[in-house]
Image (tube, helix red, strand yellow):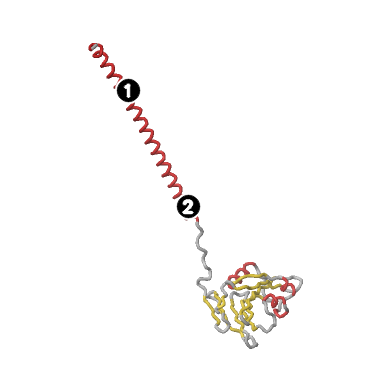
Amino acid sequence: MHDEFTQKTPVSRLIVLIVSVVVLITLGIYVGFDLGQKDAATESANTATSEISTTTQATETASPATTQDETADWKTYTNDNYNYSVKYPPAISYKDIPSGVEGDSILDFYMNKDFTYRINAVKNNTGYSTLKDFIKSSSAGLSVDDRNVFTEISINGEPAYKYINHLTDATSKKIGATVLLVKSDFYYQIETGSQYSPEFTKDAESEFDQFVSTFRFTK
């Protein structure tokens, strides 16, 4: 019995060795696979973070620039008697024009060789309580066509109306524009053009609108 056990012992040891090697190889393969999975997940996460960062940078780069104020270097005229201010280009001149009517004010700005911008502050003696009624009345000095075509606008939070002036002859040529506002006991008219003016083009209207956009009440 002792001899038989002695002969089988080397064989048993060999089996144990083989099993141990197989286990070690299997364990190595499992550990290597697990590490590979973790590396792949880490690389994927880093790639996603990089893409998000790139997208964020691209979005920030594509953001529109702040709109430049084209009137930033304009001068400011302030009328303390009639409580308003307006901006105008440095090269432009202005002068007060006697209105001949007590309580009224006329101010002319010589914006270019074709169009003069005028601001009238007119005492409200019309009997009309709303600006809309005033525009529709003959007191506003508008032609029938002009009275029927006007646009409600807002100038720095103040309600206003704008209409385009036309010749009353067959040509119906556009010759200017007028904006009206009301504050306290006064109507304010900001206007440009006359029957002697050239055609009131889109460019001329844009320049007028820019001037009007700077008008503000100071009280």
Residue 112: which quarter of the image?
bottom right
Tell me: residue 142, above or below residue 104: above
What amino acid type should be assigned to the residue bearing mark 1? Val
Task: Give the residue number, with chain letter if any, for mark 2.
Answer: 58
On the picture, is 35 further left or further right than 208? Answer: left
Image coordinates of residue 22 in percent, x first then y, are 34, 24
* Residue 139 in sight in this render: yes
Which image quarter: residue 103? bottom right
Is residue 195 at all visible to an observer of this figure?
A: no
Q: Local crowd at mark 1 within 10 Å, few (<14), some, or many (≥20)?
A: few
With 71 as the anchor, is 24 left or right in this view?
Answer: left
On residue 19, the disc is: 1
Distance CA(mark 1)–CA(mark 2): 58 Å
Element at label 2 = helix
SS for callout 1: helix
Q: Residue at x 51, y 59 (%)?
A: 64
> Residue 18, how many percent across, how many down?
31, 21
* First of labels 1, 2 by sequence position: 1
Task: Say which quadrant the N terminus sits in.
Answer: top left
Horizontal and vertical percent position of residue 150: 69, 71
